[in-house]
Amino acid sequence: MMNNNKNTELLDAQAAERVLILDGAMGTMVQRYNLTEDDYCGAEFKNQDRRLAGCNDLLCLTKPDVIFDIHTQYLKAGADIIETCSFNANAISLSDYGLSSEAYRISKEAAVIAHNACNQFMQNERQRFVAGVLGPLGKSASIAPDIDKPHERSVTFDEVEAAYYDNARGLLDGGADIFLIETVFDTLNAKAAIAAVLRIFEERQCKIPIMISAALSDAAGRLLLGQTVEAFYISVMHCKPWSVGLNCSLGAELLKPHIRALSKIAKCKISAHPNAGLPDETGKYNETPELMADHIKKYTDERLVNIVGGCCGSTPDHIAQIVKCTKGAAPRNIPADDHKTYLSGFEALTIPHGAVCDVPQHKLTIVGERGNAPGSAVFLELIKTKQYEKALRLVRKNIEDGAVIVDICMDDGLIDAQKEIVHFVHLALSDPDIARVPFVIDSSRFNVIEAALKCIAGKVIANSISLKEGETEFIRRARVIRNLGAAIMVMLFDEEGQAETYQRKVEVAKRSYKLLMKEHFPPEDIFFDPNILAVATGMPEHNLYALDFIRATTTILQECPFVHISAGVSNLSFSFRGNWNLRNAIHAVFLYHAQKAGLSTAIVNIAAIGLYEKLDPVLREAIADMLLCRTKDAAELLLAIAD
Ligand code: THG
């Protein structure tokens, strides 16, 4: 087992004291050596049928002295952290050169060379560190390669994860101190890289810091995928990155507002390694070391960053100048965890904490329920008959009407839920109005949830897991969801069945919470659903269902700090099917009282929202009597009103 703990401690200590310096561009420097095709091939790859010139990572095997020399120049310039020459050292990118099988070997050698270069500087000097680079890949797991086929992807999450796995394994075996997932333009690719890294940590029972850095597609501040900088951070925060940042994209000047945006939200260190200005007509980056360093100095003047360096066009001269300009600068202070719940689609969504609140109706996070096959005959029919455009329209309508999250469910005996949810999620993500918001991925089958999560760059809610199949399976599923970067809906079920009473709801919630806390699952990413069951069914014991839900809500929030309570509200009124006016009125009254008790999230028919104040007071009281069991015959009375 590789033990990098000592280096991690040294790295943390240095980062606490000052702004650390990352190196500059590798490609820009390689060009200076005017290498020939023969240089790239070396003896070993002489007989390759493709041209290999340009495959810089291959130089780790065929011209290691060149790479060593470049690292040495950056270390002399003052870099604390140098990046391995492994930007494309994964099976997917190397397939362009027919070199896929060399991914592990190149990655390992890249780390060994960087490590050896650092070793020259270790005597009587400060520690230098090797960041093992995982590049972005030329293929994207979440962007459709053909706009006319918005459901297609050129590569799957599992393929991307497998490619990064060999890349990361090699880097670790070669002695990398840090993983640097960089130039991220598709956060789903980055999430697959994270999954691979977490798999290795698990297998080897070791851990090194993870740095993640995105590239913006233009000055508007979005990744090529379409995500904002904040949404990007939220989507990768599950791996507890050592730092997040931005690189490449723009010159330091234009990148600054986006570094500032990231700095506002991120609860970890911030890195920036911009290009040396914007490219000229010939694609060259010409910003001088002085100018670039001046811009970077403005980052440190504002205390926005913890790590700075350069990307395309930057050279050891640029790094030396950055070292000079940032000397003595204080690193950014890392804000404390605020225990807020962050979700994302292409945009960020913050859910305020679900503590008991006296001001109902303004805090509720509304999840649209219309994209639900078992919950909507119309939606199901559209899916069955492959009228996806119309089905998407129903989901879009939910968002227009006020949903800030949408539930997607394809559970139905007559359709292939896994196939349909993957297809539909791909389509939804190609629709900018829908892709903007986070999803609730809803299925009673875990493989369906897992398949859908592997399509989504954002941080969504996995709906649901429970203790129904016992603790081992509960924990296994929670870990899978965690490693895929989703929040979790926990239904209050256990081996004995659904928790129906107040007592049982609280008991199952506490047991689930304890297990998840042992797994270090962030409590703010847990949504407990204490089961909405139909009231006024004619069975007297059902009359307590709403009241027990509301009472349990308050107690669970007290017993399980920072969690949310969520409700699938429409189930409540199944006895009044066919009468949407009354059903919505019941939902509105329920939400009013449940929110007072602390409910923060509801999967709901939007028509119930904002209805409470408009209801006829007599009806409103009759409903409240029924829901809260204030009078004995309230249910019968309401049924009579309904008739
Ligand atoms: N908790 C969690 N997830 C859930 C639920 C829950 N997901 C599914 C469901 N329950 C919430 N969604 C719905 C969606 C629709 C209806 C009820 C719950 C509904 N539909 C109409 C009906 O059946 O009468 C159908 C109307 C139509 O066909 O158009 O009521 O509790 N975590």
Image (tube, rainbow, N blue to C red):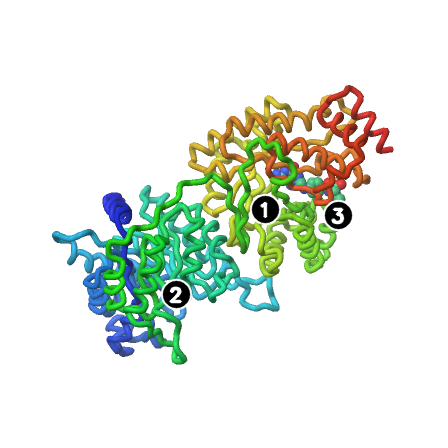
Residue at (76, 24) in percent of width and height:
539
Q: In this view of the protein, which residue sits in the foreground, 125 or 519?
A: 125
Amino acid found under the numbered disc labelled 3: Ala
Nearer the observer: mark 1 or 2; the answer is 2
For disc 1, does the CB lie below 8 Å from ligand 1? no
What SS does tag 2 mark? helix
Say if mark 3 contacts mark 2, CB within 8 Å.
Answer: no
Q: Is residue 275 above or below residue 10?
A: below
Residue 333 visible in image = yes
Give the class, few, some or many, for how many residues have Cα within 10 Å of label 3's Cα (few <14, many ≥20): few
Q: Which label sits on residue 441?
A: 1
Ligand 1 within 8 Å of disc 3? The answer is: yes
Q: Earlier in the sequence, mark 3 or mark 1?
A: 3
Disc 1 from disc 2: Cα separation: 40 Å
Image-quadrant location for residue 606: top right
Characterize the local packing of mark 2: few (<14), some (14-19) or many (20 or more) Cα atoms within 10 angstroms. Answer: some
Provide the residue designation for mark 2: 253
Q: Amino acid at mark 1?
A: Ile
SS type, badge 3:
helix
* As drawn, 538 above or below 428: above
